[in-house]
Image: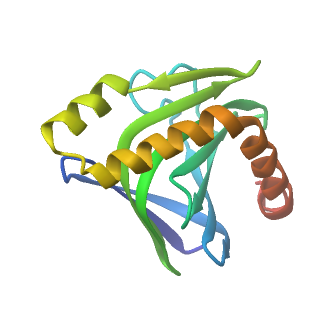
Amino acid sequence: MDVYLERKVKPDGTVREYPTELLHLGRGFALVRFRMLRGGGPPDIPVAVPPGSVSLGYFWARRPYNLYRWRGPDGGLLAHRFDAVAEVAIGSDGVSYRDLALDWWVLPGDVLLEEDRDEFEALAASGALSPRDRAAALAADREVHARYRHILDEAERLEARYAARERA
């Protein structure tokens, strides 16, 4: 399978790239899989991620957030993570976006945790985030808090449609 590249531009301009597998590419939407062979994940995550886990990435061109759905090697759901984003560009060879620093985890039992509010506020105060970026992140904040259960249900349907047959 060809590599589909996820390209994240951090607020300080640094770029992080992740090789993924494209599961579905539609109009304004991409679904990718990232295999976490070593487990772990970003620093300070609120869940244990064992080796062999999988993260499905959901990217929408017109939404102020993306979503990751993390599953353990046995297929059990570990957690979800939303990121506030801007300038999502979905192409045939990859997806790119600007990370707006604000993130949310949804843990089993519908526990919603916010991350990086202090970092977000400091970036906004310093001018590293434009007023437009701040507005996009706050729109993501409102949507995640008001609709996260609906969004997760949608992700479950999309996974069943596009990723379930691809599990290996």
Left or right: 14 in relation to 148: left
Pick whichever, 75 or 78, lies toward us.
Answer: 78
The chosen color scheme is rainbow
**Residue 60 in the image: x percent, y percent?**
59, 63
**Residue 101 in the image: x percent, y percent?**
35, 39
**Residue 75 in the image: x percent, y percent?**
78, 38
> Please, is residue 136 above or below residue 53 in the view?
below
Pick whichever, 24 or 65, lies toward us.
Answer: 65
Q: Which residue is drawn at 21% across and 29% down?
A: 122
Q: Is residue 114 visible?
A: yes
Q: Give the mark count.
A: 0
Indicate the quadrant where residue 25 lies: bottom right
Q: Residue at x 79, y 58 (%)?
A: 158
Pick whichever, 153 or 42, lies toward us.
Answer: 153
Left or right: 25 in relation to 127: right
**Residue 52 in the image: x percent, y percent?**
63, 38
Quadrant containing the N terminus is: bottom right
Q: Residue at x 18, y 47 (%)?
A: 12
> Please, is residue 8 above or below residue 149 in the view?
below
Q: Which residue is drawn at 41% across and 57% down?
A: 86
> Please, is residue 140 above or below residue 30 in the view?
above
Quadrant containing the C terminus is: bottom right
Which residue in the rendered view is the most extreme toward the bottom?
Answer: 92
Q: Can residue 71 be seen in this view?
A: no
Indicate the quadrant where residue 18 lies: bottom left
Indicate the quadrant where residue 2 lies: bottom right
